[in-house]
Image (cartoon, grey):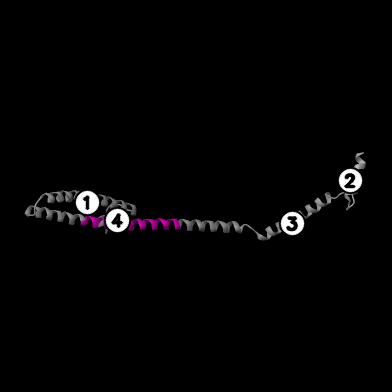
Amino acid sequence: MNRIFGSSASKKPKPSLQDAISSTDTRMASIEVKIKKLDGELARYKEQMSKLRNGPGKNAIQERALRTLKQKRLYESQIAQLTQQTFNMESAALATENLRNTMATVDAMKQANKELKKQYGKIDIDKIENIHYEMEDLLEQANEIQESLGRSYAVPDEIDEAELEAGMSLSVT
């Protein structure tokens, strides 16, 4: 079918959510400018009506003021709608970003899980227990050696302090 009718060679990418938000904000700004202009007109009509007496001239200005007021209210309702649309789009953008973050977290957790399984696969608990028992035996041997080296020779197990002091005073003199 494309050969017969042809196809557009350059398809524009669809606007992103941020593009839509920006566009809506721009539209809101232009409407706000129109509202300010209408406010100026209403102030001018109010001033003119205050100077005129009741009659056809004042009635004509009142009708123009009412039309202007209706137009202003229409623009204000459009602003309210656009504000709600912007809020909805920003909420959707936030939810999308949160979902991306969640997916990245899940992917990172999966990768960490694979890595942990790989590392734990290299560890043999029996070898670790054997090393632990060997360390325990070596420490016991080291304690026995220290005890053996720490023995005193030719010193009775129980020495009275008085005898020790007496022996010390004899060797000093």
Amino acid residing under circle 3: Glu
Reading the chain from its start, which is encountered first: label 4 or label 1?
1
**Pointer 4 with pointer 1, Cβ within 8 A:** no
Mark 4 → mark 2, Cα distance in angstroms:
99 Å
Q: Residues within 10 Å of mark 2 (few under 14, many from 20)?
A: few
Task: Give the labeled residue for mark 2.
Answer: 165
Reading the chain from its start, which is encountered first: label 1 or label 3?
1
The residue at 28%/56% (across/down) is 82
Amino acid residing under circle 2: Glu
Mark 4 → mark 1, Cα distance in angstroms:
15 Å
Res. 2 in view: no
**Pointer 4 with pointer 2, Cβ within 8 A:** no
Res. 80 in view: yes
Circle nearer the viewer, 4 or 2: 2
Mark 3 → mark 4, Cα distance in angstroms:
73 Å
The residue at 89%/47% (across/down) is 164
Amino acid residing under circle 1: Ile
Amino acid residing under circle 4: Thr
Reading the chain from its start, which is encountered first: label 3 or label 4?
4
Q: Is residue 90 left or right of residue 37?
A: right
Task: Give the labeled residue for mark 1.
Answer: 35
Residue toward you, 80 or 52: 52
**Pointer 3 with pointer 4, Cβ within 8 A:** no
Q: Which residues are magenta?
A: 73-102
Task: Give the labeled residue for mark 4.
Answer: 83
Q: Is residue 81 left or right of residue 125?
A: left
Residue toward you, 133 or 173: 173
- Local SS, label 2: helix
The residue at 48%/56% (across/down) is 105
Task: Give the labeled residue for mark 3.
Answer: 136
- Local SS, label 3: helix
